[in-house]
Image: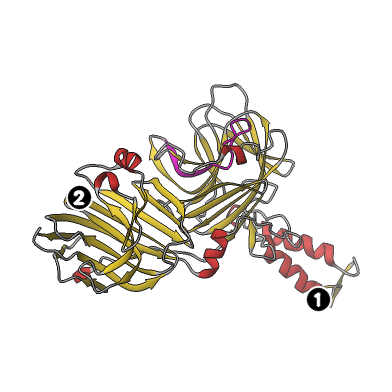
Amino acid sequence: MRLQFGFSLGKTMFVLVALFAMTTLCTAGDGYKSLFNGKDIDGWIKRGGDATYYVEDGCIVGQRGDGPNTFLCTPDEYGNFILYFECKFDEPINSGVQFRSSARPNGDREVVYGYQCELDQNSGNSGRVYDESRRGRWISNLDTEVTKDAFVADDWNTLVIQAIGPCIKIWVNDVVCSDFADVADLKGFFGLQVHGSSEPTGKVRWRNIWVKELPPTEWQKLLKPDFEDIWVSPAGKWEIDDQLVAKGTAERGESRDGMLKYEEILKDHAARVTFKQVNGNSGLYFRAVEVDKPYWLRGFQDEIDRAATASLWEVEGRGWVARNNELAEKVFKEGDWNTVSIVAVGDRLITELNGQIIIDIVDPECLKEGKVALQLHGGSDMEYYFKDFDILVYDDEQRAMIENDEMPEPDFSEATPAPEARRFVPARRPLQRLRSLIEGAREPRGRRLVR
């Protein structure tokens, strides 16, 4: 005896495809996938304080609780992406959305740290980026005259976060509210924050949370054993130890620059190095061109010299193009390790020193491609130590996305709500779902025994 169901093969295939879709995240036609199914928060991870999260009317609702800041976090990490979501406040409270974030233990709790897109009804800071539980300060610049009214206090707001390598841009209701570069993190989880508060009430809600993962960008390490793949100048003395820390020294009588030079021509890219200054003057060259001179290269130099660090000097050109010695002096750590970086995309040049943006300019006269290098300035007694000399390269498509100021508007016309997370579905439930689908798809509705 066997069971026979009265429906067509085509409908059988439909049932199987539907079942498969129920066990995976929904994907929109242009590569977006939903992070929230509109029904439950299974699979999300709560960290930090005692705020409560629940689902109501197709939204994730975060409600004030005791203790420190609370975060509802995705189980997965994301690198380069576009995140789309909508939010609204029911009751006043500070909130935010973490991205590229991490967690560390703190007693019986976890502390979430990393980039936070601010959400606040009243401050005018929504869309600005705060470095949660790490640097503890704003890290993106904000033109308040343009952005202060972007967020609507008593209605739904649409936000988009785009992260491509160190370049981060955030839109609030079509208004660019953050547009900066930071080299700290390239990957981490998302988290919905309810800020700790002494107020008795506070409630915020999120809906339509979608993410589009973009091709990755990775840091490429340039310091290798025996300076493999790096040109070492005949001037100065260079050594590298087992920990890949390079030591560069030179004497005052040497007029030529000492140099470690990467030979590949780079266009749009980021470069960073961690250094310890003992004596002399140094620099991180980028987009530099070779010359038959004692200094080997001409072009931009991200200066490395105490208070002048992260200012921009153009060799065989305009000299100082941009300086911010007052800020750099506050950030520079004398006798200790410091990290300097440059992000060059098109005509925009952004330097950082120890996680603080020092220079952010648009310079149409800058060279558009060239080499990166570390310099020991000639004619000085020199002693420097370098480690973590890295580059990250953008392609033309990534550059176009970074330079675009129009808020991405995904097409969700073909999308459906995301399903429940597979890991929280009891073992028998898929069979029950299949049986339900089969029952609904049968033609005719009856079932008969066939001998």
Disc 1 crowd, CA 10 A, few/some/many (<14, 14-19, 20+): few
Task: Provide the residue designation for mark 2.
Answer: 277
Which of pointers 2 and 1 lies earlier in the amino acid sequence? 1
Nearer to us: label 2 or label 1: 2
Q: Visible in this render: residue 78?
A: yes
Q: Look at label 1 and name its amino acid.
A: Gly
Q: Look at label 2 and name its amino acid.
A: Gln
Whether the magenta-drawn stretch holds residue 397 is answered as no
> Residue 233 versus residue 107: which sits nearer the camera?
233
Q: Is residue 189 above or below residue 234?
A: above
**The N terminus lies in quadrant:** bottom right
The stretch of residues the image draws in magenta is 109-128
User: Residue 301: x and y, percent?
Assistant: 32, 59
| The image quarter in which residue 12 lies | bottom right
**The C terminus lies in quadrant:** bottom right
User: Is 316 situated left or right of 190 in this image?
Assistant: left
User: Residue 34: x and y, percent?
Assistant: 65, 55
User: Residue 374: x and y, percent?
Assistant: 26, 62
Disc 2 crowd, CA 10 A, few/some/many (<14, 14-19, 20+): many
Q: Visible in this render: residue 24?
A: no
Residue appearing at x 72%, y 69% in the figure: 17
| The image quarter in which residue 274 lies | bottom left
Whether the magenta-drawn stretch holds residue 112 is answered as yes
User: Residue 214: x and y, percent?
Assistant: 55, 63
Residue appearing at x 57%, y 37% in the figure: 144
> Residue 75 versus residue 205: which sits nearer the camera?
205
Q: Secondary structure at mark 2?
A: strand
Q: Which mark is residue 270?
A: none
> Residue 191 versus residue 168: which sits nearer the camera?
168
Residue appearing at x 49%, y 43% in the figure: 141
Task: Provide the residue designation for mark 1.
Answer: 10
Indicate how the structure is coloured in the image.
Answer: secondary structure
